[in-house]
Structures are given as structure tokens and as C-alpha cells.
Amino acid sequence: MSAAQPKRIEDEACAGPQPARTTLIQLSSSQRIASSRPPRPEPAEEAPAEPESEEVRAEKFRRIEAAIDEIRSFLVRDGGDCKLVAVEGNKVKIQLTGACVGCQLASVTVGGIQMKLMAKLGFPVRVIPVPGPVKAPVKGDR
């Protein structure tokens, strides 16, 4: 066999005629398998966002607070709570308290809050849970 051809390893453990045989192909380290997938594109650099006006930030903050308040009643019923910490562009920082701290479903709760916010706001946001004491939320925190 030449070095360019793969070696064939046949399953010879079973004697007798078989309708189908398993054939494994072993490639040497110098041989490559061609992928049918195109190469991944390089991640694009994010364009700097235009600064939001004070009114736009205040409206976004108010809508985020309203959406979180709708969810809070469900969390409080189960012994937990959610507090808005800050809004920085499309990042919404929250703190889960009460029974939500250490709960195995806290990540599901954060995902649900994120989905609710995206539905309310109409654009993607990222909800980030933060630990520790909560400072008073500041409108238009950047």
C-alpha cells in the first residue's frame, strides 16, 4: 500500500458469509478529510452604537421596569424576587433574591425574564444576573 491510500481494517472476528460488513478506514495523520461545511466567517466587529437620548433611555428603563414588575408576582408567589440593578445599552442587570438564590431553575428564570423583555421592547436584550447587594437603579445607567 502506498502512503497516500488509507488502510482498510475489516471486521474479521465473525466467520461465515454476512450480508453487510463493517469497514473502517484509518487515515494517516498526513491525510485530511475534506469538510462539506464552509469555513466559519470571522466575527464582525460591532459598530459603535449611537448614544441614546435621555428620553429614549428613560422610556426604555420604564418599559423594562414594567415588564419585570409583571414577572415579579410569579416569583414572589414562589418565595423569590427580582430587582432591576442597571440598564447599560442592551444589557439589563438584575438580582435574584429570596428562594431564587441557589435555585437550580434560576437560569430558566433569567431566560424567561429575557424573553419577556425582548417581547415587550421589540429588540434583543441580554439579561445578566448579578450577585450582591442592590444599589438603587439609576435611570439611563450606561
Image (cartoon, rainbow, N blue to C red):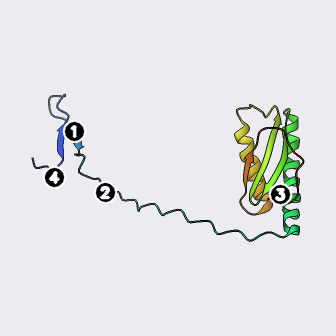
Q: Within 10 Å of the Cα at label 1, are there few (<14), some (14-19), or many (20+) other Cα atoms?
A: few
| Labelled disc at residue 122 | none
Write down the quadrant of residue 55 in the picture: bottom right
| Residue type of the residue flagged with mark 2 | Ala
Q: Nearer the viewer, residue 75 or 133?
A: 133
Q: Where does label 2 land, which residue?
A: 34
Q: Mark number for residue 21?
A: 1
> Amino acid under label 4?
Ala
Which residue is under mark 3? 141
Which residue lies at the image location 16% right of the left edge and 31% below the top edge?
12
Badge 4, how many Cα within 10 Å: few under 14, some, many 20+? few
Q: Check disc 2 and report its element: helix, strand or loop.
A: loop
Gap between marks 3 and 2, in whole Å?
50 Å
**In the displayed structure, would residue 15 be above or below residue 140?**
above
Q: Secondary structure at mark 3?
A: loop
Which residue was labeled with disc 4?
Answer: 4
Q: Secondary structure at mark 4?
A: loop
Mark whose residue sits in front, 3 or 2 = 3
The 10 Å Cα crowd at callout 2, few under 14, some 14 to 19, many 20 or more, is few
- C-beta proximity under 8 Å, tags 2 and 4: no
- Closer to the observer: label 4 or label 1? 4
**Secondary structure of the residue carrying numbered label 1:** loop
Q: Nearer the viewer, residue 15 or 119?
A: 119
x, y percentage for residue 103?
74, 32
